[in-house]
Image (spheres, helix red, strand yellow):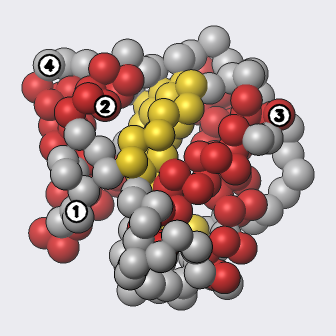
Amino acid sequence: MGSDVTEEDQEVPPTTDRVVILGLGNILQRDDGVGVRALEWLQGDPRFSQMAEFVDGGTASFTLLGAVETATSLIVLDAVVLDGEPGAVHVFKGSEMDRLLARPQAGSVHEVSLSEVLDMARLRECLPPRRALIGVQPEGVAWGTMLSGPVQAALPHVAAAVGQVLKEWRDEQA
């Protein structure tokens, strides 16, 4: 399985920021639900459970705007189609995330796309200063509640990527 991050057993640094980890996806459409399943994985990890607010965004709507606007650090977990190997984990931070979400093929099957929520926060001058999207390449999006094998196997890599992003943000503040 390809991955931009390594699965290291690393210590997640404490932070005084309001960290919001937002899981997106439809858990009834197999790998599209990876963001929500990754969120559940992180909630069970004691390294993260005390330092972040976990938000199950499901298929998204403008009800997420409050959580997004009040975050100083936002990490979004979602399926991202990049024509890579199923289960590959990719990290997009700041303007790189914005460019990914602005691409024409980034159309969302969700009720309201993440880019629309972020655009609304931007218009209201409440866009989180630190934001990242951790995307997992899906194998398939069809009716079903189970993640494919490669995407299920990517969950520890997603956790490692979240830890790495939080560490980088902490180091930038030091």
Q: Which residue is mark 4?
A: 124
Q: Which residue is mark 2?
A: 64
**Mark 4, mark 1: which one is toward the viewer?**
1
Q: Are marks 3 and 1 in contact (CB under 8 Å)?
A: no
- Identify the image quadrant of the C terminus: top right
Amino acid at the residue labelled 4: Arg
Mark 2: secondary structure: helix
**Mark 4, mark 2: which one is toward the viewer?**
2
Task: Identify the residue at image location x=20%, y=33%.
Answer: 62
Picture layout, residue 166 above or below residue 101: above
Q: Is residue 45 left or right of residue 100?
A: right
Q: Are marks 4 and 1 in contact (CB under 8 Å)?
A: no
Amino acid at the residue labelled 3: Pro
**Mark 4 to mark 1: distance in Å?**
22 Å
Q: Is residue 22 left or right of residue 104?
A: right
Amino acid at the residue labelled 2: Leu
Q: Which residue is mark 3?
A: 46
Camera sees residue 117: yes
Instruction: Give percent across and percent down for residue 15.
Output: 67, 19
